[in-house]
Amino acid sequence: MDRKQVIEKFAPIIALYTQEKEVLANLSEETDFLNDLKINSANIVDIILDAEEAFDIEIDDDSAEQMLTVGAAIDIILKQQQA
Amino acid sequence: MGERRVVITGLGVVAPNGIGLPAFETALRTGRSGIRYQEKMAELQFGCQVGGVPIVSEELKHQYFSELTVKRLSADGVVYGCIAGADAWTDAGLPLLALDAETPDWDSGCIMGTGLAGTDPIRDSIYHIDAGNAKRLGSSFIQQSMPSGVSAYLAGTIGLGNQNTTNASACSTGTEAILMGYERIRAGKALRMVCGGTDSASPYLWAGFDAMRVLTRKSNDRPEEASRPLSASAMGFVPGGGAAAVLLEDLETALARGARIYAELLGGYVNSGGQRNGGTMTAPNREGIRRCIQGALTHTGVAAADIDAISGHLTATMLDTVEVGLWAEGLGRFGSDFPYINALKSMTGHCLSAAGAIEAVAAALQVHQGFLHPSINCDDLHPEIEAVISADRIPKQALSTDIRIMASSSFGFGDANSIIIFKQFDQHGQETGN
């Protein structure tokens, strides 16, 4: 799976948690979950659970704490897939 | 400044026999039962296999909740309560505040009571936790399983900035919530309160009642005849779920914005029998109910002779005869002098913490529209009731009649009692005078 494929599969997951449709439509690796997508911080744990299920991976606590941007999320997903 | 007067300007209801005011009013007028055979109860081998379950479609949920909330919210009582509460608000001609509004409505709050607003989230979570997967609970478990889940979701749906809480006093909950909201407005601490109750329509909640053998077991093949308050053949109550809410509003505020007024809420009284003198966890101290009736009259300034109708608690157990007897004694009115009395639970089953709220919505509609709904399934009136009041005091068909004052009573486990009193309000400038 390359970064583009990950983002394509990941975007619908985060779509559920944001009202910022325009930011979502122009998602980039720099897009920040809390500041740009205005996602409720309590929902980050839900996004992690959804991602674990969708990509069949486990995301540990240290990685979870670093998942603040789309780019960071892709890094973590790819790393765990290879683990 | 004197104490404020409180009126009802909005109603919302999710009842087993009608979701939304038009459907509910039609059910009231036609005596339509919402009791159906419940396959799940049969599968679980309950003695009672009938119940009152409001059918809320996915489409309806999407009218009130975001995609995310619909996906995550499995507490049916929270769903019912939010729909009823939001409906009461919009029925009063008030807008739900936009999510990006800068300020909430600081003068409006909610008291939505519940006994248990959902068993599904609790049931699901226990499997995850026992399997060592606590983290799979995600973020939505606490917010929908905490007792105040319903008021928390509702306050967010509307944008309420005043008191936002949940009360609980078993089957007295819904009536108590309305009285608590009344007192807050009366004290000048809020201008509007959305008040009512909700309970899950879940066999997992009802199982305990089935185990206590307080649910009827005799009418599984005749669901619509199963709930039989006031009748000689009443053999226990039919469990139900759902929610209802009234929007209570400061009279001056309501008049200033030209709101439609269903009725004035004169107040009422709550107390407990203290589980003494015959009262127990599950049965009332009769002196407690006597004092509750007297307290409601004293605190509203209503004379016993002026009560035109009573919406009874009347669940279809042997306590129906006790309740009617205590009302007759408490008002000093017997036989044909007794007010009209009807039992909404004959059509909805006993919706537990929501019951008093659903009955309050029905009472407000009846006072406003000038009718009384029938009490169904009591053609065989209990002889001990007929010994105290005339049979014609119980409407068998919807009855068109002017109702100036109506009382509604609720009683709950823990020996908890509550009574509220509604008064007709003349919309054309002046209250109907004494």
Image (cartoon, grey):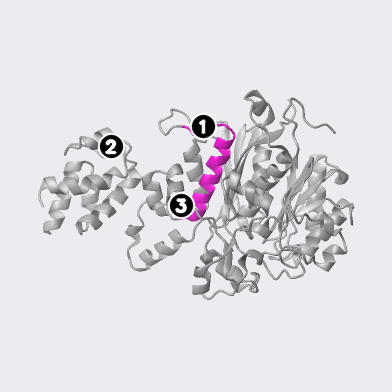
**Of circles 1 and 3, which is in front?**
3
Report if residue B341 is visible in the image: yes
Label 2 belongs to which residue?
A37
Label 3 belongs to which residue?
B57
Label 1, residues with CA under 10 Å away: few <14, some 14-19, many ≥20: few
- Seen in the picture, residue B198 relative to B227 is either above or below; the reply is above
Q: Main SS type for the magenta part?
A: helix
What's under tag 1, amino acid-wise? Pro
Label 2, residues with CA under 10 Å away: few <14, some 14-19, many ≥20: many
Please tell me if label 1 and label 3 are on a single chain.
yes
- Subunit of label 1: B
Asked if the stretch drawn in magenta spans residue B95, the answer is: yes
Q: Magenta stretch: give its range.
A: B75-97
Marks 1,3: beta carbons within 8 A? no
Label 3, residues with CA under 10 Å away: few <14, some 14-19, many ≥20: few
The kind of secondary structure element at disc 2 is: loop
